[in-house]
Image (cartoon, rainbow, N blue to C red):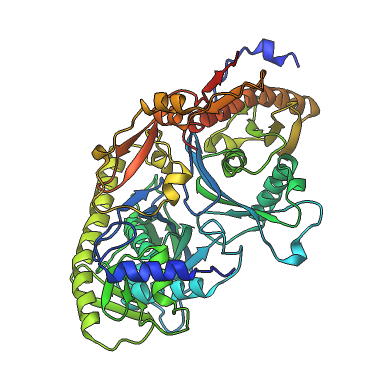
Amino acid sequence: MRDVFLSNCEKNFIQKLVSEGHRLDGRNYNESRRLDVTFGSEYGSCIVRLGETKVLAQVSCEVTQPKQIRPNEGILYINVEISPMAAPQFEANRQTDLTVYLNRLLEKCYKDSKCIDLESLCIVVEEKVWSLRVDVKVLNHGGNLIECASIATLASLAHFKRPDVTRSGDRVIIHTIAEKDPIPTVLYHYPVCMTFAIFNNEVLLSDPSFIEESVCTSSTEEGINTGGGLLVIGMNQYKELCLLDLNGAALYDSNIVHKAIISAAESSKQIVDLVKQRINSDDTMRQKRIKINFADMITSDHLLSLTRKDLSIQLKKFNVDDMTLKNDMEHEDNDDEPEPSKYDGKFENKVMTIFEIYSLISVVPSLPQTAEIISNKGVSKWIEISSDSD
Amino acid sequence: MGIEEEKPKAFQLKPMKCEFNFLSKSDGSAILSQGDTVAVVSVNGPLDIKSTSQSIEKSTLEVLYCTKGGKPSVADRYKENVIRQTCEAAVLGSLYPRTGITVTIQELEDFGGLLSCCLNCTCLALLNSGVSMRCTYAAITCAIDESGDIVLEPSKQHLDTARATMTFVFDSREKNLVTSVTEGVFSEDTYKEALARCHAASDLVFNFYREIIRKYANVI
C-alpha cells in the first residue's frame, strides 16, 4: 500500500474546525451520512452506500465437511478485499493491515457474537454441512469502511437464502431454487459496527469521513500525540454490546466510551430497522416477480461531475435559493472588454465568457445542505465574442 | 461487407445504461448495464509504480478483474489478459512513459455477455478518466446455437446450449478487428458471418458512446 500523506495544513484545519464545533461536510457531531442498501438479482448480494463509501457483499454457499471439534455446525467464512478500485493507494492482490484488521473485526462481530444459527447449517453430522462465504469488496473508500462493510455483511447475510436439501437414506439431494423454495439464514440478532472518531480525548464524531479518520489518528507536526483515535462499537438492535475496539491514543476518560455507547445504541436501531425494511420490500418485490438487478442503481436523472463530488466542503447554513445566477453580467463583461489597439488593424479579440457556461447549468438543492449542478440538455458551447476593429 | 444491406438494422442490442463518475476516489469510473449484465470499472492513472514494472517507452497497464464472490480462478486471469491487450491497443501509452495505469473491473451481474460488457465499460471508464486514447473500441458477443444460427448478445440460456461463443472487439477509426475471443467448434464460414454481423452491430455501441459523451460533456 502506498502511503497517503496528510499535509499539516489539512491536519491543523480539521483539528481547529472540530474544536470549534463544526465538521467539514456540515454535519453535526452525531450525524451520520446517508445510508442506502441496494440488492442484486441473486440472493445475498448487496451494495451498501454510506455517503460516498461503497461496499459490495456477496454470500455464497457450498457443502463441505465440518470441523472436527464442531461436527454439527456449519462454517461461516468472511473475506474482505480492497482492490485499487477503492482508492489509488491500494495495490492489487496485496493484503494490507487494513484488510486484515477489517476481516478480523467482521469475524469478531458476526462469528464470535454468535448471531448466526450455525447448527441449522448442518446436513449430516460429521459429514456434510453448509459453508457460508461472505465476500466483501470495497468499491469506494470514502471513510468509515468498518461501518459500511459491517452493514453490507449483515444485509447480505440476512438477505441470503440457501437451497433446500432433502435426505433419502444416505443420499442428499440439493434442490435448485426453481424446484423448492430456498431457506433463509437464521439470525438471532443483528449486530452492526459503528465507528466514532475521537478528537483531543473529548470530542466524539460519529461516521467519520476519510479525512477525519486520518486526522484523528495522526499526530501533530512536532510529533505530539493529539489524543485522538478511532473507537469501534458493535451493537445489535437490542442495544447489547457485541464488540469494542480502540485504535490510536489511550483514553483518559471512560465517560467518552459510555457516551459513544449511548450514541451507538440509537443509531444501531435505526440501521437495523432500515436493513430489515429494505429486505422486506425486496422480498415483496420478488414475490411479485419484479426483476431486481444492480442495473436499477444506474440513474439518468442526474449527471455527476467529478468537480462536485470532490468538493467535500458543505456549508451548514447554505441556502441555494439565496444564490441567483446573474446572466446579465455577461453584458457588463462585454463593456469591460478592452478596446483593440488601433495599431493592430487585423487583431481579432476573442473572449470566451464563463458566464455563458453558467447560463447552461443551474444549481439546484439536492440534500438539505448540498447543492448539485444539473445541466440543461444540449451541447455545451463556447460563445465567441469578436470585436472587429476598423 | 455486404451483410449490412441484407440485414438493414433488423437487430437491436439490449438496452444499455451507463453512469460516469460512479466512484469518487478514482480518476475515472463508469458503471454499465447491457440488458441485465452489469459491471463497474475504475481507472487510476497515470500514476507512480514500482521501478521493476516501469517501462521506459510506455505506461504499464495493469488490469484487475474481480468476480462477485468465490475464489479467484484461472478464467478470471484469462479475462484480465484479454482486456489488458485490448486496452493496450487503444490507450496511447507512449505519452506517459514510466508510469502505470490501473484498471479495476468489478462484476456485478452476469446474465450472459459479461466479457463484452466489461470491455465496453472499460472503454467508457478510460474515456471518463481522460487518458489519451488512439481510438475507442466496442465489443459484441454472439453465440452459435445448436442449429448453427448466430445469436447476437446471447442470454444465459442461449450460452448454456450454444455450440460456440465468440466475442469481437472493433476499433472506432477504421472499424478493424482488435480482439477476437472464441470458444467451441465452428466452421470458417460461420466465423466470417458472425464477424460481419458483429461488425455491423458495433455501430450501435459506438452511437451509444457518442450519446453518453454528449450528455456528460455539459458537466465534466
Image side of residue A344 versus residue A254, left or right: right
Which quadrant of the figure has residue B120? Answer: top right
Residue A337 x/y as whole percent: 50, 27
Q: Say which of A142 and B41 sits in front.
A: A142
x, y (%) of residue A147? Answer: 35, 65
Q: Residue at x 38, y 84 (%)?
A: A249
Q: Is residue A347 above or below residue A42?
A: above
Residue A286 in percent (x, y) is at 31, 42
Quadrant for the C terminus of chain A, please.
top right
Residue closest to the far front:
A343
In the displayed structure image, the side of residue A77 where residue B77 appears, left or right:
right
For residue A228, what is the image quadrant? bottom left
Q: Is residue A324 above or below residue A132?
A: above
Quadrant into which the N terminus of chain A falls: bottom right
- Quick one: A313 or B195, which is closer to the camera? A313
Q: Residue at x 46, y 24 (%)?
A: A334
Q: Is residue A230 visible?
A: yes
For the question of whether residue A116 can be seen, the reply is no
Q: Quadrant of residue B179?
A: top right
Residue furthest to the bottom in view is: A252
| Total number of numbered discs in the rendering | 0
Residue A343 is situated, as x and y percent measured from the top left of the image, at: 66, 22
Q: Is residue A282 above or below residue A303?
A: below
Q: Against B214, is A174 above or below?
A: below
- What residue is shown at x 23% (from left), y 65% (from top)? A30
